[in-house]
Amino acid sequence: MDDAIVPSQIYQLIHTDATFIDLRDDYSFDQLHIKNFINMSSDQLLSSMHQFPLDKPIYLICYTGKQSQKVCQKLRSLGYDSYYIQGGFDAFLSIPPAKYY
């Protein structure tokens, strides 16, 4: 399976048993974020990977998708089932938002 998720798939995914991580800065996260996502920097995430089970999917989002894609690839190399939101939060904002926040 491809590791890129299109923003319109988020609504279906946030109702699954997975880990959702927003890699944006604290201020941006506090201003607006997708429900069920937790806020962590990529450094925080990578240093605390032992807390996340290998068999539970991890979905990542950042501003444009570039940082989350890099982190996703790193997690996959470590054996995690990880995915990133293609286009990041910028792309996510282009879809009808009411059901996500």
Image: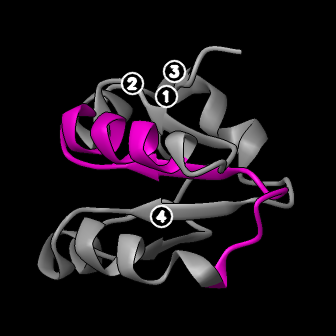
Q: Which comes before the other along the chain, label 3 or label 2?
A: 3
Residue 79's x, y, as percent?
66, 48
C-alpha gap between disc 1 and disc 2: 7 Å
C-alpha gap between disc 4 and disc 3: 16 Å
Residue 56's x, y, as percent?
80, 58
Kind of element beneath mark 4:
strand
Q: Disc 4 marks which residue?
A: 21
Badges 3 and 1: C-beta atoms under 8 Å apart? yes
C-alpha gap between disc 4 and disc 1: 14 Å
Instruction: Tell me the residue at 76%/60% (across/down).
Output: 54
Residue type of the residue flagged with mark 3: Val
Residue type of the residue flagged with mark 4: Ile
Residue type of the residue flagged with mark 1: Pro
* Camera-nearest residue between 5 and 101: 5
Q: Disc 1 marks which residue?
A: 7
Specify whether 16 is left or right of 92.
Answer: right
Q: Is residue 93 visible?
A: no
Residue 44's x, y, as percent?
32, 81
Q: Disc 3 marks which residue?
A: 6
Q: Disc 2 marks which residue?
A: 86
Say which of marks 4 and 3 sits in front: 4
Say which of marks 4 and 1 sits in front: 4
Looking at the rendering, the stretch of residues picked out in magenta corresponds to 51-75
Badges 3 and 2: C-beta atoms under 8 Å apart? yes
- Badge 2 crowding class, 10 Å Cα cut-off, few under 14, some 14 to 19, many 20 or more, is many
Q: Is residue 46 visible?
A: yes
Question: In the displayed structure, would residue 57 be above or below residue 39?
Answer: above
Badges 4 and 1: C-beta atoms under 8 Å apart? no
Farthest front residue?
A: 78
C-alpha gap between disc 4 and disc 2: 14 Å
Residue type of the residue flagged with mark 2: Gln
C-alpha gap between disc 3 and disc 1: 4 Å
